[in-house]
Image (tube, rainbow, N blue to C red):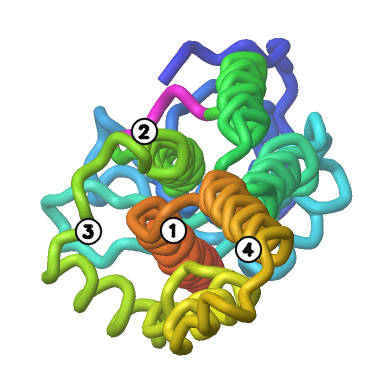
Amino acid sequence: MDENTAPFVPYVLVHSNGIMYDSSPVRVVSSCNLNIYTFPFDIQNCTFTFNSYMHTARDIRMNLNVSASSILENSLNVMSTVGEWQLMNITAYKGIFNESNYDELIFHIQLKRSSALYVVNLLIPSCFLITVDLFSFLLPPQSVDRSAFKMTLILGYTVFLLLMNDLLPVTGDTIPLINVFFAICLGLMVGSLLETILITNLHSGSRRFAPVPHWVRVVFLQTLGCCVGLPPKDHSTDMYPNAVREENKVGKNPPMPLEVEDTTLGELRKLGRDLRAIRLQVDQHLSGDQNTEEWSQVAFIIDRFLFGLYTLFISVSSITMIYLWVN
């Protein structure tokens, strides 16, 4: 505790019945241990003890002259703050000791932090950024713009944390819950970027991959695909167009007799078969082979599944944070 900085008052009020009042003001600076775990919704309970270090209870008796409610009312009327703290309650009682001990008065002061500034400057922007990152899953996963967007979002959130670092408390024995909230938001953004890199790699490099293993087909295409609403595509039919299948059916028919087969008609049929073969190759080139489609389907299923996990984790984390702050 610092020294008394109040002005000296050399007056004592003396009554005719022998009672004397020495109302010298005392202004000291004391300290209070802060519990900043629930910052910025924290409520601090500070204890102040007044006693004599030189005289025991045999020499000096200390009593509470007015009630704690009156002290609270007077304090609310005269106290001036910088806007961050609000006085909520004051309780006082006298310590009970023997004659050989020191007499003392104990005050419990309850202060509440004004959280509006921190909610507007810290929590709401973080919620907006994590919501934007959540809806970025709606972008096409095979697009490069999605990963670039997520990297820009992470960079912006990092700059935001550096700029708002001065608003966070630097004292206290515990880590504030809001720091855990920021770490979770940043971790979710990094995780979504890694997921986008994985999905983009599956889409762009599926032509170079080996055929989809059987366990991947069972776990992702059949089981997980049905859970996320993307059932496997039916590949029971071949890749040939209807015209090619019709041509194959025609090719299976018995040939016409040589005496009635016209040379021009044979050339036209041959030309038609060549055109259908070219059409088949073009369709296969445009639509991709079955291996590429299966890997692309696996990528879509993983993206949909991780999007659901991302949404679930954000919801559970938000509810947990709100519950801890409220209680």
Q: Dot 2: what SS?
A: loop
How packed is label 1: few (under 14 Cα within 10 Å), some, or many (20 or more)?
Answer: some
Residue at the farthest right position? 77
Q: In the figure, is residue 84 to the left or right of 105?
A: right
Q: Which mark is residue 266?
A: 4
Asked if the residue under mark 2 is in contact with the one under mark 3, i.e. CB atoms within 8 Å, the reply is no
Q: Nearer the viewer, mark 1 or mark 2?
A: 1
Does residue 324 appear anywhere in the picture?
Answer: no
- Please state which of residues 278 and 105 is positioned toward the viewer in this rendering: 278
Give the spatial CA distance, label 3 vs label 2.
Answer: 54 Å
Can you give x and y, in whole percent of width and height, for residue 112 in the image?
Answer: 64, 53
Asked if the residue under mark 1 is in contact with the one under mark 4, i.e. CB atoms within 8 Å, the reply is no
Q: Nearer the viewer, mark 4 or mark 2?
A: 4
- Please state which of residues 136 and 244 is positioned toward the viewer in this rendering: 244
Q: Nearer the viewer, mark 4 or mark 1?
A: 4
Q: Which mark is residue 293?
A: 1
User: Which circle's residue, 1 or 3, is located before the other in the chain?
Assistant: 3
User: Which circle's residue, 4 or 1, is located before the other in the chain?
Assistant: 4
Magenta stretch: give its range: 169-173
Q: Dot 4: what SS?
A: helix
Query: Which residue occupies 66% across, 56% down?
Result: 267
Q: Which mark is residue 212?
A: 3
Locate residue 71: give its quadrant: bottom right
Can you give x and y, in whole percent of width and height, for residue 76 in the image?
Answer: 81, 53
